[in-house]
Structure formats: structure tokens, C-alpha cells
């Protein structure tokens, strides 16, 4: 279990990673990202600021099931 409010889940077999944010006591699916650019777009749409700063900050973003910034299944 993580305390990071944003989770980038393991890459899907077809590529891309589901992204969720925990707020107001529940998890909300933001969408599927196929690149860091997609993450930025999803974060902006959710009103999350300081995108460049938080992508690699483990207190904000947990990358599950694969290396950070990789979006294809291994």
C-alpha cells in the first residue's frame, strides 16, 4: 500500500498504463497514459499542478509494475 495519491499502474499487455488519483477518500481513474505527455494531459485535466516536479517524486506518484516512464508491456 502506498501513501502516494497518484498511482501509475503496471503496463497493460497492449501498452499504456492506467492512472488513478486518490482524493476525497476514494480512487478516481484519470485514464490510460501511453507516454509522459499523456500523463501531463491527464494531470492537467484533473487540476494537478507542478507536473514536472511530481512525476519523479515518490511522495506524489507511485509507479507500479514496471519502471517509471516506460509504457509498453515487457
Image (cartoon, rainbow, N blue to C red):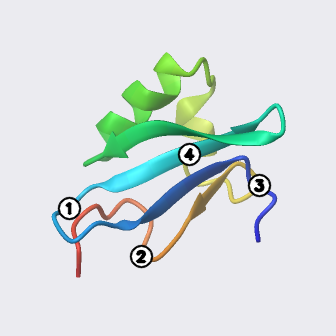
Q: Are marks 3 and 1 in contact (CB under 8 Å)?
A: no
Q: Are marks 4 and 2 in contact (CB under 8 Å)?
A: no
**Does label 2 or label 3 sit earlier along the sequence?**
3
Residue pictured at 31% horizontal, 36% vertical? 37
Pair 4/2: label in front: 4
Q: Which residue is mark 1?
A: 15
Q: Which residue is mark 4?
A: 20
Q: Which mark is residue 66?
A: 2
Q: Is residue 25 above or below residue 24?
A: below
Characterize the local packing of mark 1: few (<14), some (14-19) or many (20 or more) Cα atoms within 10 angstroms. some
Outermost residue, left side: 14
In the image, 20 versus 62, the foreground residue is 20
Indicate the position of residue 57 as horizontal and vertical percent values: 67, 53
Q: CA distance from mark 4 to mark 3?
A: 15 Å
Indicate the position of residue 7 as horizontal and vertical percent values: 58, 54
**Does label 1 or label 2 sit earlier along the sequence?**
1
**Does label 4 or label 3 sit earlier along the sequence?**
4
Count the marks: how many?
4
* Element assignment for label 2: loop
Left or right position of 12 against 4: left
Q: CA distance from mark 2 to mark 3?
A: 17 Å
Pair 1/2: label in front: 1
Q: CA distance from mark 4 to mark 2?
A: 16 Å
Q: Which mark is residue 59?
A: 3
Residue 28, image quadrant: top right
Residue pictured at 62% horizontal, 25% vertical? 48
Amino acid at each position: 500500500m502506498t501513501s502516494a495519491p497518484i498511482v501509475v499502474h503496471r503496463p497493460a499487455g497492449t501498452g499504456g498504463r492506467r492512472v488513478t488519483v486518490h482524493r476525497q477518500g476514494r480512487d478516481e481513474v484519470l485514464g490510460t497514459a501511453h507516454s509522459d505527455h499523456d500523463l501531463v494531459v491527464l494531470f492537467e485535466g484533473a487540476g494537478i499542478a507542478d507536473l514536472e516536479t511530481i512525476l519523479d517524486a515518490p511522495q506524489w506518484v507511485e509507479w507500479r509494475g514496471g519502471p517509471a516512464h516506460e509504457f509498453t508491456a515487457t
